[in-house]
Amino acid sequence: MAADDTPGADAQPDAGRQAGPRPAGEDRPGKDAAATLWQGRFEGGAADALRRLNDSLSFDRRMFRQDVAGSRAHAGMLAAVGLISTEERDELLAALDEVEAEMAEGRFVAAPGDEDVHTAVERRVTELTPAGAKLHTGRSRNDQVAADLRLWTCAALDGVARGVLGLQATLLSRSEEAGGALLPGYTHLQQAQPVLLAHHLLAHGWALARDVDRLAEARRRADVSPLGAGALAGSSLPLDPERTAAAAGFAAVFDNSIDAVADRDFVADALYVLAVLGVHLSRIGEELVLWSSSEFGFVELDDAYATGSSMMPQKKNPDVAELARAKAGRLIGHLAGLLATLKGLPLAYAKDLQEDKEPLFDAVDTVRLTLAALDGLLATARFDTDRMADAASSPYAAATDLAEWLVARGTPFRAAHAAVGDLVRRSLAGEGSLAELVAADGRFGPEAVALLEPGASAARRTTHGAGGPGPVAAQMERFRQRIEADTARLG
Ligand code: ARG
């Protein structure tokens, strides 16, 4: 094992915990060390290494608003079914308000025994009111943590969707600005057929539209209350899970108490959706890396979104685009990591499930930051449309148009393809320019030469969803409406 540089680290294994007499030791505090929720059953306090491995407050305190919201709903339900008085409910609600304010304002002082956010909130509520001792009635941290994380996920996915819509709006305005600017469309990263720059930018926009859909679907699946499932089996007390669910703002309530506490599909769903979104951002990033190279020269990045080199004064580097490209790896890793944690896990709750939060939190943070940076990068980049038009103007890019010109005059496509291929080969071999060969060829003639003019090929792309000016204008309108509808849906 590598040297541990964590202050106070103690790598001694804690074997005595499982069997046999407990040796005295520094890592074996007495009963009045930091209090635990389960101290009634235990003789001694928890080992330091256990606390450091087990405690999750450092990261799950992020869910304090959701934890307080779930407790409010639970307290309301307990009063409604007569398990606590309305006075006790009101004292609990006031204490929960106070705890939420302390946490929001950074005034909350964690106690040594605050294992996680649920423990911390309940401990502080109980300091503020004796009714706190009734808050955990009919509840387990197992249903509580699932509820908190579901509420957190719903809000987080909405936030990500807003970020995606922002990037889509930038792609739309850059597309509008691009007007009739052309660039070579690529397959195999080889120049293929010229298209409008707007068409290319909107292609990324539509991929993001599917992400917005997926985010909404993942949110819908997360929006189910597990409250009332208890540790795993429900309760002997007259709880009303439907009431708790509605009060906490959930759209639905669990069907099976075991599933309610064991299920983390909603986290996997969210991580999958974020990973796919990350893959889309990586494809945008990669193109900006290519386009900003001097070899392409299609785009110049704004200084605010570019970096320099510590050694080479001439350099301007596309770090934002590179990181957008790279972050997908980390997002895919989070999805794979969580699935590995869930695989083979017996029902119902096991502490393994505590490993759901950090990947989700990191994935959401990573995506939101990447979206914001990429949005800024795209909004401020300068497209060199002359350079793009130049690259798009190769007569060879119109080869398909020549073949289709023959097809329109009755030639079977395969024969037309071969005829044009023959001219291209002869031109590349130096027999003449493609225009000269086309003009001299009896099957084509001077009329077909006009197809080789810059812009002619894109202008002839007139079918639904195609890369020419007419369909791109219609597509742009559909895209604008799609963004508006999704924005309205998000509220
Ligand atoms: N911190 C725990 C988690 O994130 C809360 C649930 C604890 N439940 C338990 N039975 N120990 O999963």
Image (tube, grey):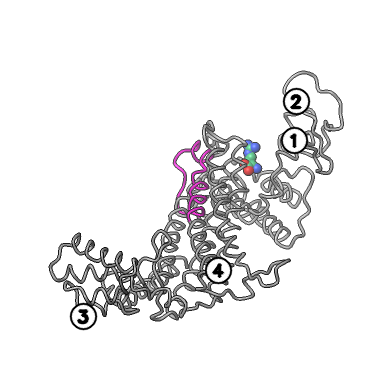
Front of the two marks 3 and 4: 3
Instruction: Please check the rendered image and state whether residue 255 is part of the magenta-colored stretch, yes or no.
Output: yes
Examine the residues drawn in magenta and state their main secondary structure.
helix
Q: Which region shows up in magenta?
A: 250-276
Decide: is 258 above or below 453. above
Q: Which residue is mark 1?
A: 50
Image position of 111 (left or right of 158): right
Decide: is 46 above or below 310. above
Image quadrant occupied by the N terminus: top right
Q: Which residue is mark 4?
A: 293
Q: Position of residue 163 (x, y in %)?
A: 53, 66
Residue nearest the viewer, comparing 331 with 305? 305
Secondary structure, mark 2, is helix
Q: Amino acid at mark 2?
A: Arg
Q: Which residue is mark 3?
A: 447
Front of the two marks 3 and 2: 3
